[in-house]
Image: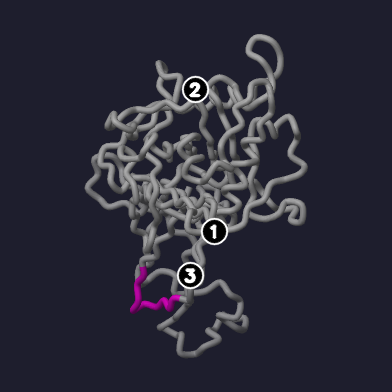
Amino acid sequence: MAIYKRFKIELENSIESSDVVTNVKDVVSSGMWADGAGTITSFFTSSTQSSSNHQYFLDTYSVNPQTDSTAKPQFSLAYGHFNGSGSAGKKGVDGNRASAAIYRQLANTLLGPNETQFTFPGSLAGAGSAHIKPKYVYAISIARQQLREKMDPGNWELHLSGSGLSNTVKLIDDSGATTNPEINQGGRVFNIVSGSISSGNSTIKTAAASQPGGGLGLFYPDMGILILNGPVIASQTTASLSASLASNAEGGNVGKFFKKIEGGNYFQARREEVITSQHYFCRVPNKDFNFSSNPTFTSGSGGNFTVPTFYKNPKSFITQVGLYNDNNELLAIAKLSKPLLKSYSREAIIKVKLDF
């Protein structure tokens, strides 16, 4: 009675088929937030986040970390100013100038080697289209454990609260209207625009090039980072998000940004991963695996079948497949959803898929 069966591995230049197919790649989209959820409607911060970190970024959770010990940050918020305004310290004198450090870090990560400032498409009154360089930006950086590989373009929507429910700002990206996206140091770049997603379809309210004062932001899906045009976002959500631009003074701008997200009550997003798989085709010919090692399969010292009708026509049920190495060490088990009847008159091919 056979217990093991060796896979047939295709040799180079061989015309024979192989039982093992390697390096199969599939693109998988899934909900980006905790436990695979696609949407967050409640937002929390942690009172235990250190004050030294707080001036640089603010971790944001989908459940209250004060009451749920398993809570993990879903994304971080940051405020960056080209000249360091809105944070303590003076250039070349003292203080951390956290907003300047954040701006430089974002620029170094996302922009090209000769670029130092974020540029947004848009329109200026009386000047037609233009490329606008605001002094400050707000940033959302997705936590690595949630991002995994990259965000799924065209599959996120963020709401920022305005002065009233009707003034809620709904943000999406314009990937659906972009056939040849810009690619720079941060990977692909799409514009953040006003719009919404319904039944998987994006509807853009105002294109970036037509946005007065400059586009709403830039989206870097491969990095999991959203950069928002500070002055324009502030004008869209009323003055309560207007940054405090005082010199050598902490402006609390990250906290203001969090309040807008908290009030919006909605962040839908999906991530995209390339899953590499190996397929093992377990071929079961009619003459193999018709007997069972289960001690109840036979009875008595003579090894007679417990079920008399199995004489000359044995049957077994395949419930799982074990994958072993050359030392007969069990590496993986694949379980069938229901037992598979096997006999001399029945053959089977069971495909086992391993994802990496």
Taking the image as shown, residue 212 lies to the left or right of residue 74, namely left
Q: Secondary structure at mark 1?
A: loop
Q: Magenta residues? A: 340-348
Q: Which mark is residue 37?
A: 1
The Cα–Cα distance between marks 1 and 2, rounded to whole angstroms, is: 32 Å
The Cα–Cα distance between marks 2 and 3, rounded to whole angstroms, is: 50 Å
Percent across and percent down for residue 342 are: 41, 76
Q: Secondary structure at mark 3?
A: strand
Q: How many numbered marks, from 0 up?
A: 3
Q: Can residue 22 be seen in the rendering of this structure? A: no
Percent across and percent down for residue 335 are: 51, 67
Percent across and percent down for residue 333 are: 53, 60
Instruction: Name the residue type under label 1.
Output: Ala
Mark 2 and mark 3 lie on one chain; the one further toward the N terminus is 2
Question: Which residue occupies the foreground of this view, 217 or 213?
Answer: 213
Mark 3 and mark 1 lie on one chain; the one further toward the N terminus is 1
Residue at 56 percent across and 80 percent down: it is 297
Mark 1 and mark 2 lie on one chain; the one further toward the N terminus is 1
Q: Which mark is residue 336?
A: 3
Q: Is residue 232 above or below residue 262?
A: above
Q: Can residue 198 be seen in the rendering of this structure? A: yes
Taking the image as shown, residue 153 lies to the left or right of residue 35, namely left
Q: Which mark is residue 108?
A: 2
* Quarter of the view holding residue 85: top right
Between disc 1 and disc 2, the foreground one is 2
